[in-house]
Amino acid sequence: MKLLLLGGYGVFGGRLVELLRDLVDLEIVICGRDQDRATAFCDAFQRHAQVRPLVLDRKDIAQGLKAQQPDLVVDASGPFQDYGDDRYHVISACITAKVNYLDFADAADFVFGVSEFDSAAKAAGVYVLSGVSSFPVLTAAVLRQMAKSMDIVSVTGGIAPSPYAGIGLNVMRAVVGYAGAPVKLHRKGVQIQAVGLAESMRYTIAVPGRLPLNNIHFSLVDVPDLQVLPPEHPTLKDIWMGAGPVPELLHRVLNLLAKARAALKLPSLVPLSGLFYKVLNLMRFGEHRGGMFVHARGLHNGQAVEQSWHLLAEGDDGPYIPSMAIEAIIRKTLTGMPPETGARPATRALDLSDYETLFKTRTIYAGMREQQSECAPLYRQILGTAFDGLATPVQALHDSTKTRRWTGQAHVRRGTNWIARAIAAVIGFPKAAPDVPVTVTLSPLAKGELWTRNFGGKIFSSTQHKGSGKNEYLLVETFGILSVALALVVDGNRLFLIPRRWSCLGIPLPRALLPSGQSFETTRNGNFCFDVEITAPLIGRIVAYRGELRQVDEPL
């Protein structure tokens, strides 16, 4: 199979080549206007893939097809918003030459309009799929899965790239181009125009049992989903899609510029794209993690329901997700399962199971969250489906909304410097002891639980409740005037409690001073085991205690 890859040495094209590098039956022609860049790119892959460079501009595609006679053209160049009056020039040439076509288009109008070539593509016996990327292929697959259990009425989605992912100049031109420009979307069942990057919301991406991303600021983006998804779901009345690039400060500057452009009817902000491109790729700090979410509201048997899908990508794996849809289609084609002929948006090109197969080889995790009853046990509300994977004794301690009492033995260690001792004394932590009897009583509150711990007569307590706002999907534990928001992370038979944020009397405190330490719950010899360590920057250990507990009575 011979693939002609336009923009082959760019961000998306380059990642696609990396994903396909193991396919010995695939020849990839790396096309672009810069011979040196194309050659240098190919030289880096010669040992791993059949690649060769070719100087070819999009406007000369007809000659290129005649000379190269490929089986497939992939357009990874863009920005598709800037293709001008003859925006489907490449598609027309491919149909004329009877060559299959895929693209990474993120321009909503471009993707929505490609169906006008359906009859011509079928007559030529080729497939033409546009928008073959996370938006809309992955979101569409998620919504089809959700639609099995509800009539979807409202959809909100977003993508949050890692600050280290890097972004191409053409992508930045596209984003800055629709900042402050009209964006078509559906509200209350009617197509309206909103303002790109001028509407914002916050959301926490939290795969059940995994470390959530920090609560992220998302802004409205002009993606194909806004136009191509509503026709697939007759009951869908509202749709909104956003992006959450970081740092948030730069993101908010772009929000202000978008609002100013719309209010003052200023010209396009595209001339600023180079500046944003440089600054965004220089300001790389924070966690090297990215994610995506789709949140749907709808009806099931006349009852209102909610469901959300969350994706987390660790390290360098996230930036490959936009290229995975085309990778999957090429792999399926090579095994004799090509797409059906015709021209259309790529919304039905893949199912969620196709993505799940690709995710298994990488540190990419995804999961669904159902709407949880406020009457459900606290930890079950936060962990969702991951709760059922906890060790049996850990489940037993948390799977109740009634008062219960557990007893056992503990080993306590304390910090030795005077600051650590003072903090421990104020909170009421127990003194150091090698073997001390312990009783933990969990009592229900209107919202959450009261944990009362008795270490050999030394009693201290805290309250726990489900977080909201920036603490969404976190467990908030309060000791007096201090509150710590903890992520519940399941790893094997351990449930880790990882500090993410903290506050004093509701006022956020610096994350640089956030207490830490490895704390987890697990099982040993059929008993519930705890291992808690609380340390602080510049201070060190404040307290650490570990031991075992057994339930002494049934929940009251």
Image: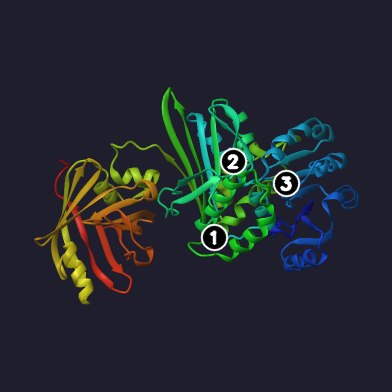
Q: Nearer the viewer, residue 228 or 245?
A: 245
Q: Amino acid at mark 1?
A: Pro
Q: Which mark is residue 195?
A: 2
Question: How far from the left and from the top, in percent, is residue 436?
Answer: 13, 65
Measuring 33% from the left and 55% from the top, which residue is drawn there?
A: 485
Q: Quadrant of residue 438?
A: bottom left
Q: CA distance from mark 3 to mark 1?
A: 24 Å
The residues bearing labels 1 and 2 have C-alpha atoms spaced at a distance of 25 Å
The answer to whether marks 1 and 2 mark residues whose Cβ atoms lie closer than 8 Å is no
Q: Is residue 133 visible?
A: yes
Q: Which residue is mark 1?
A: 163
- Mark toward the viewer: 3 or 2: 2
**Left of 380 or right of it: where is 232?**
right
Q: Which residue is mark 3?
A: 80
Q: CA distance from mark 3 to mark 2?
A: 19 Å
Residue 10 location (% of width, % of height): 71, 58
Q: Which of the two discs, 3 and 2, labels the residue nearer the N terminus?
A: 3
- Label 1 secondary element: loop
Q: Position of residue 449 (x, y in %)?
A: 22, 46
